[in-house]
Each structure stands twice: as C-alpha cells, then as structure tokens.
Image (cartoon, coloured by chain):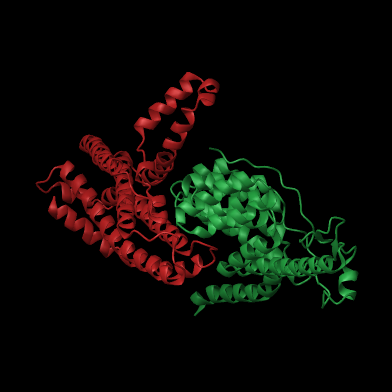
Chain colours: A red, B green
Amino acid sequence: MATIIHITLKGIFRDRVFQGIMVLAVLFLFIPSAASLSMRQMTELTTTLSLSLISFIMLLLAVFLGATSIWKDIERRYTFSVLSLPISRTTYLWGRFFGIALFMLMTTVFLGAMALIAIKAATFGYPPSRPVVWSTIIVTILFDALKYILVVAVAMLLATVSTSFFLPVFGAISVFLAGTATQPVYDYLQTPSVQAAVSVIVRKAAETLYYLLPNLSGFDLKVHAIYSIPFNVQGLILTSIYFAGYTLIILSIGSFLFAWREMK
Amino acid sequence: MSVLQRPVTALLVGLLAYGVVLGPFTAYMKQKPIEEKFGYLPSINVLRYVSVDHKELVGASLVMKVIMYFGGVAEKQQANVIVQPPDYARMSGILHGAVQLDPYNMDAYYFAQSFLTWEVKQYQMANNLLDYGMKYRTWDWMLPFFAGFNSAYFLKDYKQAAEYFKRAGEINGNELNISLAGRYMQASGQTELAIAYLGAMEKSERNQAVKKNYQIRLKAFNEVRRIELARDRYKNTEGVLPVTLDTLVRSGLLSPPPSDPYGGQFFLEPDGKVATTSKFTFAGAGNVSTPKVSK
C-alpha cells in the first residue's frame, strides 16, 4: 500500500496541484487589509476569512482529487497495469485514498501556517476583544481537514461505480451540501410546531437521510476559533470516532463495489 | 503568419472594445444609485442553508454590506449632497439576519446600536438585539453597557439600566459602569453623560464614516450643553427661565450663538429644555419595522 500512497502523492505533485494551491494562498496576504474594514473585530474577521479560504481550497481539492483519481486511472488504462501487480483492488483503492488524505493534511499544514501568520499580523493592527487561542485555531483547521478527507472518501466511493467523472464530482458536491445541512434540518424538524405541521413520512425520510448522509456540521468549529470559545472535548472525541467510523464504512463499501466492477 | 492573423485580430478588436467601454462603464457603475448597489438579498432562512460551513463569513459579509452602504450615504450627507436618507429598515433587517448566522458578530451589534437609537429611535428593538447578543457574547461588557445607556437615557427605565450596568461592571470589573448607572439614575445631567458616552464611542471608532457621525453628534451635544449652562446662569441671575435663545445671546451669556451641525435651529422648549428643529438628524428619522431575532 505504501507504494500506491507514494505513487499517488508523486502524481499529485507532478500535476502541479501544490503550485496551484500556493498561488491561491497568495490571497492570505490580502486578508488583514480586507479585515481592516471591520469596525470592532479585525482579528476575528481575519480568522473568519482565513478559515473560509482554507475550507474553500480544501473543498476544491477534495472534490477534484477524490473524484478524478480513480476515474483518470481507468480512463488512461493505468489500472490494468497497476492491478496486474500482486496487490488487491482494495489495497489499490485504500492506497489512493490515503495518498490523497496525506496530501490534504500536508496542504492543511501549509495553509494553516499561512492563516496563523495572517491572524498574527491582524492582532498588531487592532487587538481582539478576547485573546487569540492558537491551539483552538489549529484544532479547528485539523477538523476542517478531517471533514474534507471524509468528502474525498465519498467522492472515491462514487468514482468506483462511475464511468465518467460527472457523478463523483457533482455527487461529492451534493453530498457535501446535504451533509452540512442535515443537522440544521434535523433540529428544525424536532421543534414542536414543525412536528405538528409536517407529516410523519416526511419526518421519517428526513431522519433516515440524517443518519445516512455524513453529518459535516460537527466538524465545523470555526465559531470556536474566531471568538476563542472553549471546545467541548467530549464532542471532539465523538466527532473523531464518527469520522473514523464513517470513513471506514464508505471505503469498505467502495472496496466491495470496486472489487465487483468489471474492467474493460 | 496567417495562422496567427485571426487570434491577433480578435485580440486587437477585444482590446479596442475594452478600452472604449472601460471609461463609460466605470462612470456608469460609479453613478449607480446606492439603493441599486445595495441589491437584492435572499431571505436569511435560505442563506442559512446556502452558506454551508461559511455562516460566519456570510454573516460578516452582510454586516460589511450594510456598513459600506451607510458609509456611502453618510459621506454624501456630510458633504451636503442631497440624497435619500439611509434605508434604516433594510439595514436593521440585514443586521438582524447577520446575527442569526453568526450570533457572536460584534460589528452587527455595535453598528445596530449606533443607528437604531440616535437615528431611528427604536430603543426597545436595539435592546432586544443587545439582549440576544448577551446570550452569546457573555464576556463582552459593551453589550450590557449599550443596553444600560439605552435604558437610562432613552427609555428612562432606571431600574433596568442599573441591572445592565451592574452586569457590565461584573464582566469588566470596572467601577465606571456602576458609577455611570448611579449618575443616570438621578435623571439629571443627561447631556453631560451623553457627551461622555459619545466621546468614548468616537475615540474608539475605526470606521471613518461612523466616526464622523459620532463627531457631528458630539458637536451638537456640546452645543446643547453650552446652551444649558447659559440657561442655568440666566435663571440664577434673573430668577426665571429665558423664553428664547436670543435672550441668552443678547445678554452675552451665549457667545458665539449656537450652531447645529445638522443644519437645524436650536430653541428652548417651555420647560427650558434645549431642542433643535433638526432633531439631531440630517433628514429626520425614518420608520423601522420591528424584525425579531429567533431564539
């Protein structure tokens, strides 16, 4: 598997993805000056903009790397040569996943460092109303990375059954959008007024989707980082276990589907 | 050569068209009414789902949109350009929406406080918004400080003001809030305290349009204070309240004559209270509906 991870990483760097990220990271330089428009919370706004920029870049990476990796291999017929090696399809799939996940983590470290520099620069301009808690920001960025690694897993699952990149790309984006909305929708449906107005079938359908789709709201800790609000440590542990469990399920299903897939 | 001829021609035509249109297009965008620039915004319930994991960013963008809109109108008003007064109802609605996306956004509360009270006189709405913010920004003494000021100065609810100031004092450990509360509760010397409040706000303000707004209001209240002092001196010497400001000016107690930076005329009400025809606004206050913040 280490070979596949190595090949995956090498391929991503060869495609100059990292150079693209570095170009986008130039935007971090402009964040403190954009945040100076704020009346009272320049540092908070810098943190908001930095975290959102990281999220945006990571989403693009997750969708395109996750969705195109396997599809590209099949399209270029690389899979035939790879799968003729003494490795299983599962090892190939998981190797690809861990390669992309590793790249996502490397990108997170790079973008995270840029964000911390931008936030530090902002604190010189106008002191925040509360002291910046750097560890909170780092944990927030890490959980953001986990969220997008989960999206990579979803995109790869879709790629195992798809013959084009449309399904994995648009499917991953749809799952991401739905995954961030399931918790607010679920909370909304639990309110007494809605329970009286909405039929049981609709509520049950929504509840099923709530448990079926990845709950990405749990990974969004931005508000803690921006306003230095302490974490619920138990919640973080539960979210980490949720990430591991959900990713394992997705990859396992992906492995089954990929093993059964007919290669022509 | 012929291979490059077409793209080069297309590029030249494109550059020519761009060069021709750039000036008029920029002028057109610059002249566009502020109300048009404010544009359409979807309902907050839609934005809540569309903004996915960028709720804080969308919340901050909404606040920025309102601040920039207000800055544009205020600068024109301050330059004596006749413009429609700011659409306070819309501004209030957007800020109420922004805090539903990010209930911690300080700019939203701070800016809403600055215009909901002085400009549109929706004191209770301002305090409801501040109450909502206090549930989240539990470390922030400014929100109860604002609410205390509104309760004492505008709503004359001294009991409630005392509670807010006490809370502010408990958060920042500063006796200033408590002493302010005590002075407010005497229901006297309100102009002096308003000057102190506005002075503190103006000093810490970074946004130039809002800062200028505070400066103008401060100037107006300093004039009010000057008239009040002259009025009190007149009453001490003559034993009766002056009927008009002219009396004070002629007696030499009020020199130079007061000037309202909002363009109005100061006058004395029958009970001696100082008032102005401008009501301390450039164009008079608009009406604001009462948006609610969901719990």
List the single residue furthest toward the left: A86
Q: Is A259 displayed left or right of B120 in the figure?
A: left
Q: Is A244 displayed left or right of B38 in the figure?
A: left
Q: Using the rendered view, name the quadrant where residue A137 is placed.
A: bottom left
Q: Residue at x 55, y 46 (%)?
A: B163
Confirm whether residue B282 shows in the render: yes
Confirm whether residue B41 shows in the render: no
**Looking at the picture, how far across and down is residue A4, in whole percent?**
17, 53
Q: Residue at x 17, y 51 (%)?
A: A81
Q: Using the rendered view, name the quadrant where residue B285 is placed.
A: bottom right
**Looking at the picture, how far across and down is residue B9, in whole percent?**
58, 76
**Looking at the picture, how far across and down is residue A261, in whole percent?**
24, 37
Q: Using the rendered view, name the quadrant where residue B44 is placed.
A: top right
Q: Nearer the viewer, residue B46 or B292?
A: B292
Against A258, is B99 above or below? below
Q: Nearer the viewer, residue B133 or A25?
A: B133
Against B244, is A255 above or below? above
Q: Nearer the viewer, residue B144 or B26?
A: B144
Q: Residue at x 21, y 38 (%)?
A: A255
